[in-house]
Image (cartoon, rainbow, N blue to C red):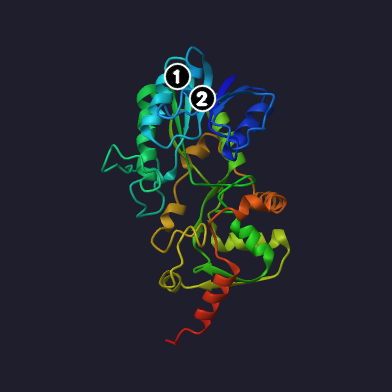
Amino acid sequence: MKALVLGGTRFLGRHLVDALRVAGHEVTLLNRGRGDPAAYPDLEQLRGDRDPRLGDGLAQLRGRDWDVVFDLCGYVPRVVRAACDALAGRVGRYVFVSSISVYDGFAAAGLDEITPLAALTDPATEEVMAHYGALKAACEREAAAVFGAAALIARPGLIVGPFDPTGRFTYWPLRIARGGDVIAPAPSTYPVQFIDARDLAQWMLQAALRGGQGAFNVTGPAGAATTLGDLLHACAEVSGVATRVHWLDADFLLAQGVAPWTDLPLWVGPRGAAMNEVSVARALATGLVTRPMRETIADTLAWARSTPVCVAGASVGLSTEREAQLLAAWRSRPAL
């Protein structure tokens, strides 16, 4: 199979390319060369920006054909449409990596692929950080408009594992491995969902080979529900370091200015838990397999320890000083 990967080789792209190579497929990369330009010197690498306003990278695709295209870096509908138009009629399947953030709210647990999507109030906006979910939903529509039944939409939750540049999952294995007093948001039964990038890459490849079409929530775990308490307990078992986890009341943390998701990753706040409880039944029915959580933790911790600069640059998590301040404030709060 001939595969084209649109995007870098920093994280998910790296694991996808690895999966493609192991399976013996012919791979071409199109990206700007900013993630890891030295990676995969044996592969065909096309350099250029896919945004027509910023370069002519897409010109290198015209007149060529691939069995499948994996679009890992589409955030703006105009840019996604340009890539789709450049490849229309010459691609067997177009796999677009979207996000569960496309849904119009998370009022209840168990939302599935037919849940209404977020809509842009200003269709011309390209402010990705402010309108991430609605823009991703608009990107999905562009891919579907061009490729129809040949469009496969993956909607992952939090993508985790080795080479993750965000630190959003890595914070917890590293923090538990430091030991001592750890702050976590109560209750310990707070649900969490995430997908190992290697499992996501493997599912995308297999789904493309099977001719999958339509949208799929692709997060985990594949088995029983996982809680934040389960995660931290598993981190402690993997690291073998003694810790004291203090489960602080959510309202207290919010009153102290602690930001869900960034200061305490995987916690979306007391009213956002349903974002960690989406249905993955459709993906499971098409072969999604997720590895044991402890394996992801161990591999992520080993990678982070070997490349600390990658995690140090991530602006997530609480500093040691901030944790101490919060714990002192918690202990000195007035008795009810």
Q: Is 53 placed left or right of 176 in the picture?
A: left
Q: Which residue is mark 2?
A: 69
Q: Is the C-beta separation of discs 2 and 1 under 8 Å?
A: yes
Q: Is residue 215 above or below residue 172?
A: above
Question: 193 and 159: which one is in front?
Answer: 159
Percent x, y for residue 300? 66, 50
Vertical order, 197 against 110 (above or below): above
Whether residue 289 is visible here, answered yes or no, is no
Above-or-below relation of 289 to 271? above
The amino acid marked with disc number 2 is Val
Residue 231 to residue 130: above or below: below
Q: Which residue lies under the disc numbered 1?
A: 87
Q: Is residue 73 left or right of residue 182?
A: left
State the quadrant of the C terminus: bottom left
Residue 202 vs residue 12, the one in the foreground? 12
Q: Quadrant of the N terminus?
A: top right
Query: Where is residue 257 shown, x and y percent of the image?
Result: 43, 69
Spatial distance from mark 2 to mark 1, Cα to Cα? 9 Å
Q: Residue furthest front?
A: 54
The residue drawn where x is 61% and y is 55% is 312
Across and down, in percent, residue 110 comes to 41, 50
Q: Mark 1 packing: few (<14 Cα in 10 Å), some, or many (20+)?
A: many
Please, which residue is most extreme toward the bottom here?
Answer: 335
Residue 90 is situated, as x and y percent measured from the top left of the image, at 47, 15
- Residue 320 visible in rendering: yes
